[in-house]
Image (cartoon, rainbow, N blue to C red):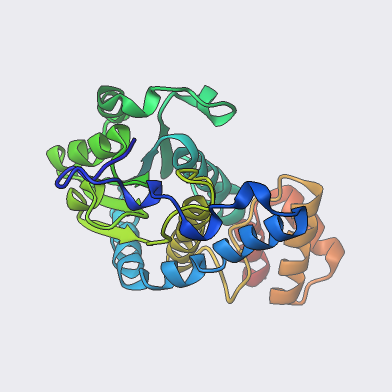
């Protein structure tokens, strides 16, 4: 069970929540209400970490602008959240899939089911980052709710050895992960409603931090105009419809013209540039 490496005390994400000790005795409505109430403080916990989020976003912008890559590293819920964030950036913003990657403990199979013990293998983390050629221009963003996951800690330690930038995302202050990072983003959400189930408040906090961090970076790198995703790749009927609306709104062209250009150019940015050159 995760413990603080310095004091040996139980990590705050593993502590028992006094407000939910009778969880199994509640009526269903009360149970659901209490679970929602417990999650209500997540936003304020993330807001308290805004200065570190800003530092991390600036570092990641500089990394990508200089030709480097952004590599997530994590296990379990944390790793799956990171993998989802990395996967969603190319269709949303038109970014190169190679720019933001995820090193997940247990590999791709861990996306669908738990691979027990994978989080305890620091060698696997280092080996995968080495295989991907981690270098000084890159940045590693490692996630661990408790801040003690060996797979995540090893990723940041290896980043330091390779002189790459290192960022920690965690819910435990004073953790090993935070200590080895250039920038440590800590959202202190406190004990979970179900003790140790960090897929709950800690998971929600990490999802929110990933969401705002990657979105802010993509906005700053020019993939958004106003609040419209002008880097969108129209790979589905829904996205083609959205791309058509965006082109019409930004240029005043007809829907028919927008649809034709999206089809011929293959992405919204190229279609928009073509319309503006006419």
**From where the camera sits, is residue 58 visible?**
yes
**From where the camera sits, is residue 266 visible?**
no
Figure quadrant of the N terminus: top left
Image quadrant of residue 244? bottom right
217 shown above or below 107: below
193 shown above or below 157: below
Residue drawn at 35 percent across, 66 percent down: 53
The percent position of residue 103, horizontal first and vertical second, equals 39, 33
Figure quadrant of the C terminus: bottom right
Left or right? Give the position of 229 relative to 96. Answer: right
Residue drawn at 31 percent across, 37 percent down: 149
The percent position of residue 74, horizontal first and vertical second, equals 39, 38
The percent position of residue 50, horizontal first and vertical second, equals 37, 71
Left or right? Give the position of 226 relative to 136. Answer: right
Left or right? Give the position of 34 relative to 120. Answer: right
92 shown above or below 133: below
Image quadrant of residue 106? top left
């Amino acid at each position: 069970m995760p413990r603080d490496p310095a004091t040996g005390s139980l990590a705050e994400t593993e502590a028992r929540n006094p407000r939910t000790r009778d969880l199994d005795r509640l009526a269903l409505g009360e149970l659901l209400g209490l679970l929602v109430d417990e999650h209500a403080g997540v936003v304020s916990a993330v807001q308290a970490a805004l200065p570190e989020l800003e530092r991390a976003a600036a570092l990641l912008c500089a990394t990508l602008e200089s030709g480097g890559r952004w590599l997530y590293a994590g296990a379990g819920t944390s790793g799956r959240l990171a993998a989802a964030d990395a996967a969603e950036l190319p269709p949303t913003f038109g970014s190169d899939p190679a720019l933001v990657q995820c090193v997940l403990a247990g590999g791709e199979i861990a996306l669908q089911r738990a691979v027990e013990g994978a989080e305890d293998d620091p060698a696997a983390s280092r080996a995968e980052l080495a295989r991907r050629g981690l270098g000084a221009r890159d940045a590693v963003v490692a996630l661990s709710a408790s801040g003690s996951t060996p797979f995540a800690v090893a990723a940041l330690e290896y980043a330091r050895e390779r002189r790459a930038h290192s960022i920690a995302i965690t819910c435990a202050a004073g953790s090993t992960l935070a200590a080895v990072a250039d920038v440590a983003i800590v959202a202190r959400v406190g004990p979970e409603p179900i003790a140790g189930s960090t897929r709950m408040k800690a998971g929600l906090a990490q999802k929110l931090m990933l969401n705002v961090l990657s979105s802010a970076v993509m906005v700053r790198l020019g993939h958004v105009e106003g609040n419209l995703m002008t880097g969108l790749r129209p790979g589905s009927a829904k996205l083609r419809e959205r791309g058509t609306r965006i082109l019409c709104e930004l240029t005043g062209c007809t829907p028919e013209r927008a649809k034709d250009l999206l089809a011929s150019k293959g992405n919204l940015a190229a279609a928009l540039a073509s319309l503006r050159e006419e």
